[in-house]
Image: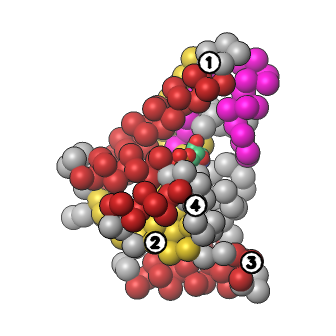
Amino acid sequence: MTTKIAVFASGSGSNFQAIQEAIEHGELNASVALVITDKPGAFVVTRANNFGIPVVELSPKAFENKAAYEAKIIEHLKANDVEWIILAGYMRLVGETLLTAYENRIINIHPSLLPSFPGKDAIGQAMAHGVKVTGVTVHYVDAGMDTGTIIAQGAVDVVDGDREATEARVHALEHALYTNTLKQLFEQ
Ligand code: GRF
C-alpha cells in the first residue's frame, strides 16, 4: 500500500525535494498528498509547484490561536487521507491539536546528534562548541523542542572552521537518512 504523507516545511524544502525524488525513483512507496507551509511564499512552494504537488499556505497569524490554526491544517489532512506528517524544516512547535490527531504519526529531521544541540541553528551551535563530529537525527515528534523518541541517527565529520562545507555534508546525509528511515517506517 502506498502511504499518503504531508510534508510540512517553512523554508527551502530540500528535504521535501529529496523525499519526492525518492518516490519518483521508486525508492519510497509513498505519495506526497500535500505540502503545508506556515511561511507563504517560501521556496518549498516553488519546489512543490514544480512537482505539481498541491500546497497549503497558512499564516498562523491569521488564526485566533494555535489550536484554530492546527484545526484548519487537520481539515486539509483529513480531506486528503493523509496518514503521516513529515516535518522537513518546519520551524514551529507542533501543538496538542495536531499531536492528538496524528499520535505517533509525526516525524521530524534535525541537523544534530540529539539530544545535543536542539532548537535553531543546530549546525552553528555544533561549530561554536568546536565538536568534531555532528550529525542528523530522525525522531518522533512530541510537545517538546526536538525531544521525541529517536528513530535513526547518522554522524558527520565537521569540517573545521568551514560552516558551508559542514552544512553540505549534513544536508547530504539528511536527504539519504530521511528517505531510508521513512521507507523502513512505512514498511512496518
Ligand atoms: C534541515 O536541516 C532540517 O534538518 C531542519 O531544517 C532544515 C531544513 O532544510 N529541521 P530544507 O528546508 O529541507 O532544505
Type of residue at label 1? Val
Viewer-nearest of discs 4 and 2: 4
Label 1 residue SS? loop
Q: CA distance from mark 3 to mark 2?
A: 18 Å
Question: Mark 1 or mark 3, which is nearer the start of the sequence?
Answer: 3
Type of residue at label 3? Lys
For residue 138, side relative to residue 124 (left or right): left
Q: Sort mark 2 into few (<14), some (14-19) or many (20+) by Cα contacts within 10 Å.
A: many
State the residue position of label 3. Answer: 61
Residue 129 quadrant: top right
State the residue position of label 2. Answer: 55
Q: Looking at the rendered structure, which numbered label has been put on residue 158?
A: 1
The answer to whether the residue bearing label 4 lies less than 8 angstroms from the nearest atom of ligand 1 is no
Question: Mark 2 or mark 3, which is nearer the start of the sequence?
Answer: 2
Type of residue at label 2? Val
The answer to whether the residue bearing label 2 lies less than 8 angstroms from the nearest atom of ligand 1 is no
Where does the magenta region start and end?
118-139
Label 3 residue SS? helix
Residue 14 visible in this rendered orientation of the protein: yes
Q: Is residue 171 above or below residue 56?
A: above
